[in-house]
Amino acid sequence: MFTLYKKEIFSFFNSLIGYIAVIVFLLINGLFLWVFPMGFNIIDFGYASLENMFSLAPVVFLFLIPAITMRSFADEKRSGTIEMLLTKPLTDFQIIFSKYFASVTLVVLALLPTLFYAVSVYLLGSPKGNLDMGGLWGSYIGLLFLASAFAAIGLFISSITDNQIVAFMMSLIISGFALMGFDFIAGLALFGKVDLFIISLGIQSHYTSMSRGVIDSRDVLYFLSLISVFLLLTKTSLESRKWEKKNKSVVSQ
């Protein structure tokens, strides 16, 4: 399992798209937070806070994480190596978790340089150190859970197609709906008191709650449940491929 995990990490950085995805994530965050005179600019914001980064990052992750996960199974299926992978002495869950944790690790590596932003804001604060550390770490934890959920969605989508572009677009759409779709539906005010329940089905409300620095067990349970559902769907997708192959071999005989 660990060998497959390392293979996934190395294969990502052996491809140009791997470096492009991470660089684009850091570049977009850096430009919007420190250069462009827009609403996200930390200097113009006037407060010692990284709130703008944590508002921007989920939207950037909508593109970054599908770019990371789109190759996971789609490339294996396109190249024909998926059959060899499934015959290795590994369970379906070991294969899935290897690819999943590799994707999450890459997201963590992309996030690590943003700690320099935290240090910068900490030093630039008046007085120095005037930074809500509870909110900061809560936001990082929330962002990690959000990224983990996007990775699970992307992995499932990659398992049902052999086209990386299709995997990217479908992951982007489904992750985007999970992030903002339920809030949009509730915003139409068509369901009355049920609107609050609809909002709670989306990622945004739970991510926002964590960003306040309060790690609520209900938010953690929500993300773990969402991740588990899509990883189980990925396992079902792999099993269906095995059954399809087995049925074909029986018919051919």
Image: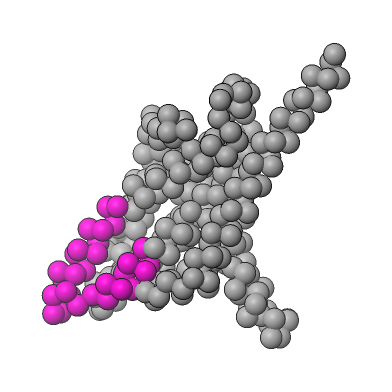
Main SS, magenta residues:
helix
- Residue 167, given in percent of the width and then of the height, sits at 60, 42
Q: Nearer the viewer, residue 82 or 222?
A: 222
Is 91 displayed left or right of 213 in the figure? right
Give the tally of numbered discs. Answer: 0
Q: Is residue 120 magenta?
A: yes
Span shown in magenta: 112-140
Image point (69%, 81%), residue name = 194
- Residue 195, given in percent of the width and then of the height, sits at 66, 80
Q: Nearer the viewer, residue 101 or 198?
A: 101
The answer to whether 13 is drawn above or below residue 197 in the figure is: above
Q: Residue furthest bottom?
A: 193
- Residue 114, given in percent of the width and then of the height, sits at 29, 57
- Residue 240, given in percent of the width and then of the height, sits at 73, 36
The answer to whether 250 is drawn above or below residue 227 in the figure is: above
Is 89 displayed left or right of 121 in the figure? right
Image point (51%, 49%), residue name = 151
Q: Residue furthest top?
A: 253
Is 44 displayed left or right of 209 in the figure? left
**Residue 158 appears in which quarter of the rendering?**
top right
Image point (16%, 74%), residue name = 129
- Give the image's coloring scheme: one colour
Image point (46%, 59%), residue name = 145
Q: Is residue 67 magenta?
A: no
